[in-house]
Amino acid sequence: MNAKILVVEDEEAISHLLKYNLTAEGFEVAIAEDGDDALPMAAEFQPDIILLDWMLPNVSGIEICRQLRARKETRGIPVIMLTARGEEEDRLRGFDKGADDYVTKPFSMKELLARIHAVLRRANPAAAANVVTFGDIVLDRETMRVTRGGEAVTLGPTEFRLLEALIKRPGRVYSREQLLDRVWGQDIYVEARTVDVHIGRLRKALKKDGGVDPIRTVRASGYALDETYNG
């Protein structure tokens, strides 16, 4: 199951950027635009982690953090504070109110993702596990190995990254352009048809022993792992 993240951020540009990048990483993301929405959404959504802006309208992030820790249903949810306040005194205030980590704006997504995974590992090792399972397909990010039905599947690096992208969100249809960005990178020019070639190789490897094809082609749209597949 994908880890869930609640982003509490009133700056629309930042919240959209966070949602786009976190969703691309396989997280389930919800957005609260101010402090008044944060507490009820945290109780209802029950995220695995909260990214909480310090400077919010109506109720400050520090006060939200204090209230999260005071409530039984939310006191165990890890919180990473996002703020332009970088002074030691401010960081100490955040930790004093129950924050688990502190990221100063502006921040890089790479750093933020590393902090998120670190906090998730401490709070709930299963939420950030390196092993992802879909039906009888098991993908191990750490060893870069894939098995299906207990049998090893031999994949090249590109096919492994394609499967890794698809397995994050079973059922979600990824366009060729989206897969190009996630697998080859945004700064590298590769023809969209290249995706078809590597999807074909991935399919062949997964079906080596005659198994059902778990990859669904959506005409004129792209590819997805078939959410009805159960191995």
Image (tube, rainbow, N blue to C red):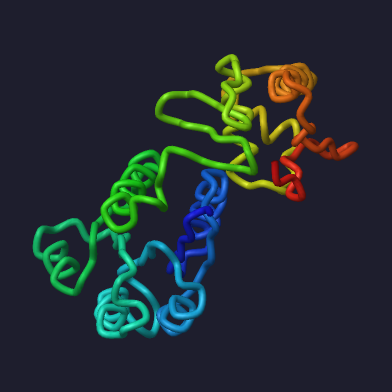
| In-image side of 75 versus 167 (left or right) | left
| In-image side of 75 versus 142 (left or right) | left
Residue 53 seen in this snapshot: yes
Q: Of residues 8 and 137, which is closer to you in this image?
A: 137
Residue 49 position (above or below residue 208): below
Quarter of the image holding residue 179? top right
Residue 110 coordinates in the image, percent (x, y): 38, 39
Residue 172 position (above or below residue 214): below
Q: What residue do we see at 48% from left, 60% from top?
A: 4
Q: What residue do we see at 30% from left, 60% from top?
A: 80
Residue 46 position (above or below residue 121): below
Residue 194 seen in this snapshot: no
Q: Of residues 143 and 177, which is closer to you in this image?
A: 143
How many labels were placed on the picture? 0
Residue 74 coordinates in the image, percent (x, y): 35, 77
State the quadrant of the C terminus. Answer: top right
Residue 90 coordinates in the image, percent (x, y): 15, 65
Q: What residue do we see at 20% from left, 71% from top?
A: 98
Quarter of the image holding residue 142? top left
Residue 165 coordinates in the image, percent (x, y): 60, 35
Q: Of residues 90 and 136, which is closer to you in this image?
A: 136
